[in-house]
Amino acid sequence: MSFELIFLSGAALFAGFVDAIVGGGGLILVPALFAGLPGVHPATLLGINKGTGIAGTAVAAAQFSRRVQMRWASLWPATLAGLAGAFLGAWTVTLISPDFLRKLLPCVLIAVLAYTVARKDLGRNHAPRLEGRAETLVASGIGLLIGFYDGFFGPGTGSFFVFLFVRLLGYDFLHASASAKVLNTATNLAALLLFTLKGHVWWHFVVVMAVANIAGSLLGTRLALKHGAGFVRGVFILVVTALIIKTGLDAFNAV
């Protein structure tokens, strides 16, 4: 096994751990891919990222579903909406540059962080505020919107899913994170299919890194289930803070 693959497998393990708790695995894995394989086309690196990440996300979704009561009547339509949104976003990025989001994203994330910190009780108690068709419509709207964002640009997708499930649907952070995994699996699948059709997935890297990502995901899921919504909220704040720093630096460098 090459040094690059060993290094990237370690990054995939850590990314799976963080992503399983609250999303944000791409924050770790994408920079590692660009550092570990500097001469490779960016689309191929993103294809490897999606192929690796979907494994851990799907396993985390399955693990959460066994221990957390999921509201499948709303989640299935929302998942389909997320899949459609991701395809639409990926198609749109072939027509319009997403560069304007590079400068806007840090501001949006700062607002999300400020709101979460200010509302000390946000996401600590699981009290869904909608039922039936109303919940399905709002959940599907979240899936379509954030799915489109994931296909079009991407950074922070899992965190946006979590925040909106907490803020709009009244979920606690644990249930929101569990639900986000299901939708994020769909949006990752859409991107992976597109990258595969374009020949931008190195499967010999993906298979090894996916195993590491699953191992990290299992550990992260276990910790989230053991420590509950308060723990997930704390990790969410840390991940969003790291995203603000990363996306802020990217925007500054772009300027």
Image (cartoon, rainbow, N blue to C red):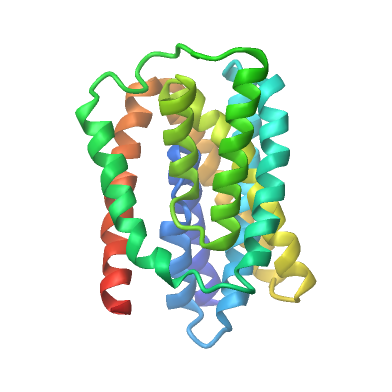
**Frontmost residue, 248 versus 66:** 248
Say which residue appears at 52% left-offset and 74% top-offset: 97
Tell me if 100 is positioned left or right of 72 in this view.
left
Q: Quadrant of the C terminus?
A: bottom left
The x and y percentages for residue 168 are: 46, 26
Residue nearest the viewer, comparing 180 with 202: 180
Farthest left residue in view: 118
Residue in the picture at 49% in, 29% down = 165
Give the x, y percent position of residue 16: 51, 48
Q: Is residue 1 visible?
A: no
Q: Look at the picture and state if 58 lies above or below 34.
A: above
Residue 151, percent from left and from top:
60, 59
> Which residue is outermost to the bottom?
39
Residue 215 in which image quadrant = top right
**Which quadrant does the N terminus fall into?**
bottom right
Toward the right, the furthest residue is: 197
